[in-house]
Amino acid sequence: MRLPPFSLRRLAFALAAGLALTAFAAAASARTETVRWEHADTSTVAGFRILMGTTPTNLNQSIDVGLPTASGGVFSHQFNVADGDTVFIAITAYGPTGLESTGSNLGYLPAPLGAPGRPQLAGN
């Protein structure tokens, strides 16, 4: 069955609007965090990895941030985190041959406080 052209335009518009709303909702459910770290001697460092997870014992995600420019000896990197998540992080350094250091001390980015719970009317 062939649809009239105006119907195809409406369908395309509806799909585009739906995708835009989905993208907006996804963007609204994330927050941007900045992690900062120092390294005593970067002469043998080719880059850094940020290890992260939602529990301190399971850092199951990593971001290779390369070798960012330090400001006053402090490196930093921004990334998105789901709004409700507390994220635990550690940093590793790797050299030009790929050998990687052990993880840094463990840090965390707490989830922002949400709205308080709903009140309950007394006696009803």
Image (cartoon, helix red, strand yellow):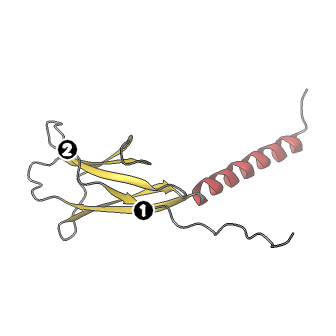
Number of residues whose C-alpha sits closer than 10 Å to that of mark 2, classed few (under 14), some (14–19) or many (20 or more): few
Q: Nearer the viewer, residue 26 or 1?
A: 26
> Residue at left 81%, top 73%?
122
The spot of residue 38 in percent (x, y) is 19, 61
Q: Nearer the viewer, residue 37 or 76?
A: 37
> Residue at left 19%, top 44%?
102
**Vertical order, 117 against 50 (above or below):** below
Q: CA distance from mark 2 to mark 1?
A: 23 Å
Q: Which residue is mark 2?
A: 102
On screen, residue 94 versus residue 57, left or right, reads left
User: Looking at the rendering, in which quadrant would you find the N terminus?
Assistant: top right
The quarter of the picture where residue 121 lies is bottom right
The spot of residue 95 in percent (x, y) is 15, 43
Q: Residue furthest bottom?
A: 122
Type of amino acid at the residue the image marks with label 2: Thr
Query: What SS does tag 2 mark?
Result: loop
Type of amino acid at the residue the image marks with label 1: Glu
> Residue at left 51%, top 65%?
112
Query: What SS does tag 1 mark?
Result: strand
